[in-house]
Amino acid sequence: MSRLDELITELCPDGVKYKKLGEVATYANIRIPVSMVNCNTYVGVENLLPNKQGKTISNSVPKEGVVIQFNTGDILIGNIRPYLRKIWLADCDGGTNGDVLAIQIRRKTEIIPSYLYYVLSSEDFFVYDVQYSKGAKMPRGSKDAVMNYRLPVPPLPVQQEIVRILDHFTELTAELQKQLDAELTARKKQYEYYRESLMSFDNVPYVGLDTLFPNIRNGFVGTVTKFFTDKENGIRYLEGTNIHNGIISDNEELYVTREFHQKHIRNELKEDDILMVQSGHIGECAIVGKEYMGSNCHALIIMSNGGNCLSKFYVHYFHTIEGMRHLKPAITDGNLKHVLARKMSFVKVPFPPVEEQKRIVDILDRFDTLCNDLTSGLPAEIAARQKQYEYYRDKLLSFPEKG
């Protein structure tokens, strides 16, 4: 019998009490001047990540006004549909905005912050929260419904043991991730060496990028949050955060209204377009596949192929040192660098025969598969461990209700 089983048998053999979240916690409601927070203590929904240590340094601290104060031990949850899974157990005092719910445990309530964090991270709470999300353009969780969520409140020793088990599980996954990172770093260095070698040309012509990609343009630039909607009513919307390592990922799924899409129809994506990140990790690019046809995008450069080259070849090329060097005429000066679509015509690129482009792409694609295959080795083990963690987390938080 495990220690947890012993505690349950001893302290709550007949089940545990269930309480509404509002009985054990409340929303933070104290407002403080923006001057009291900085990039390390301000939390916007965009820099809230889906895990216990889930906060990045903010690059969008408000310049004036007030923010909602939160304290160490509070639980912060994203309150807009694309961000509902983002949750953080605060390890500092700070401030947040209305797109984030700051939940504070009531005084004299016998509940541990880490235990409540795991409860609110569970699949059961996520499904419940989505059920009560409302709003066409920007679906939000219902604050009243969140506080009506019923959760098990076992005795403190049981809570502590559950937290210990789940924390240990998290540590094991983090250790596996370190091993994965070390192995992939070694593979990546080898891959980059061969890519640089294959992309070094002596006897090929260099041509203007716009001769190969005659339609180069910006995606939408500006504030778009008010045009967000859900998957059923919207059009997929890609950002720079979706472009990494030469592929488009679904690490963050956003959708905009059909009206917004029609207004900016020139940015509609077609198969084989290249998307390039304009700011942040500038120069990162990827090809638009069939699954992203008809999408729209934000702060990305769109390059439509004229039909005389392989888009994939130039995605590989711009990830090389030489490719970034030739991209320089389109990059702004200063600390915060940007790639400008209007200056892409100054960029010169090699133009080997299409057969040679295909040969190089085939070699690099095979090598890339060896480096990033998520169906074998450590990546598969990490994925399996994460599923196992989520399964046991939800099981550990399931109790019969007393009475």
Image (tube, rainbow, N blue to C red):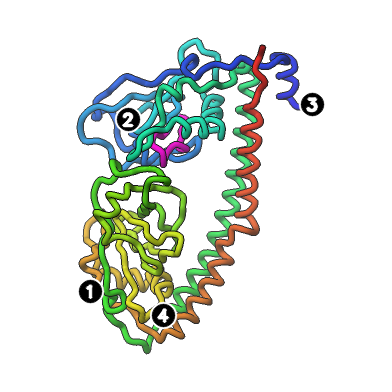
- Under mark 4, the amino acid is Ser
Question: Considering depth in this image, is 282 or 321 the residue closer to the camera?
Answer: 282
Cα separation between marks 4 and 2: 51 Å
Question: Considering depth in this image, is 316 or 199 the residue closer to the camera?
Answer: 316
Cα separation between marks 3 and 2: 46 Å
Residue drawn at 44 percent across, 64 percent down:
289
Residue drawn at 33 percent across, 24 percent down:
69
Marked residue nearer the N-terminal end (3 or 2):
3
Q: Nearer the viewer, mark 2 or mark 1?
A: 2
Residue 98 got which mark?
A: 2
Q: Are marks 4 and 2 in contact (CB under 8 Å)?
A: no
Q: Nearer the viewer, mark 3 or mark 2?
A: 2
| Magenta-tinted stretch | 78-89
Q: According to the image, label 4 marks what residue?
A: 200
Residue 299 got which mark?
A: none
Residue 233 lies in the magenta stretch = no
